[in-house]
Image (cartoon, rainbow, N blue to C red):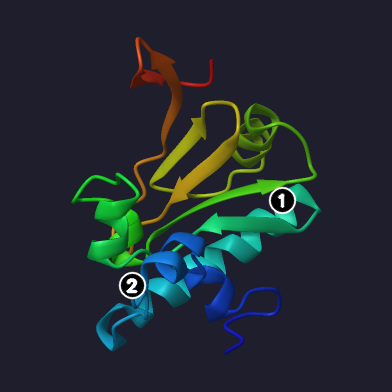
Amino acid sequence: MKLTEHFTLDEFTRSTTANRLKIDNSVPADLMPNIKLTVSQLELVRQALGTPIIITSGYRCPALNARVGGVATSAHTKGLAVDFHSSFGTPKEICQRLIDAGVEFDKLIQEHNQWVHIGFSPSKNRQIVLTAVKNGGKTVYLNGLV
């Protein structure tokens, strides 16, 4: 199902982990407004970058989220977050461009300098910017872009 000009429901729910473990990662009908909000915001992300974005993790049902080690309160389980990368540049360059372009978001995370996590909110976008790094095997979140 095509959701916007550049995004489909399939790419938003695709998961090799779900396929491998036979987890049904279908979006419940009550979360479709969140999905539509997120993909409409992703169109603005794509426009700001001037290049396509590749979604590596979008919606995650609670069972899938638990299997990939996500926190129970993850915005992914509400259809309000995606992890992605783009040929625009490094995750840090992508984050900086989105900030400079004034893209509204709830949370923007440069994840281990490998991908970008962006979350949205239907009510209040807090504009939190973090950098995730490994420290002794644990992920630590630092304020701002590091």
The one of 38 and 53 positioned closer to us in this rendering: 53
The first of marks 1 and 2 along the sequence is: 2
Q: Is 4 left or right of 34, judged from the image as shown?
A: right
Q: Quadrant of residue 60?
A: bottom left
* Residue for point 39% across, 19% down: 143
Residue under numbered circle 2: 23
The percent coordinates of residue 71 (x first, y second) are 23, 45
- Identified by mark 1, the residue type is Ala
Q: In this rendering, which labeled residue sits more in front, label 1 or label 2?
A: 2
Which mark is on residue 48?
1
Measuring from the top left, give residue 84's x and y in whole percent.
59, 50
Residue 93 coordinates in the image, percent (x, y): 70, 30
The crowding category of the residue bearing disc 1, from other C-alpha atoms within 10 Å (few below 14, some 14 to 19, many at least 20), is: some
- Circle 1 — which element? helix
Residue 59 in sight here: no
Q: Is residue 31 above or below residue 135?
A: below
State the residue at coordinates (34%, 42%).
126
Direction from residue 51 to residue 3 in the image, left or right: left
Q: Is residue 144 above or below residue 78?
A: above
What is the total number of numbered labels drawn onto the structure image?
2
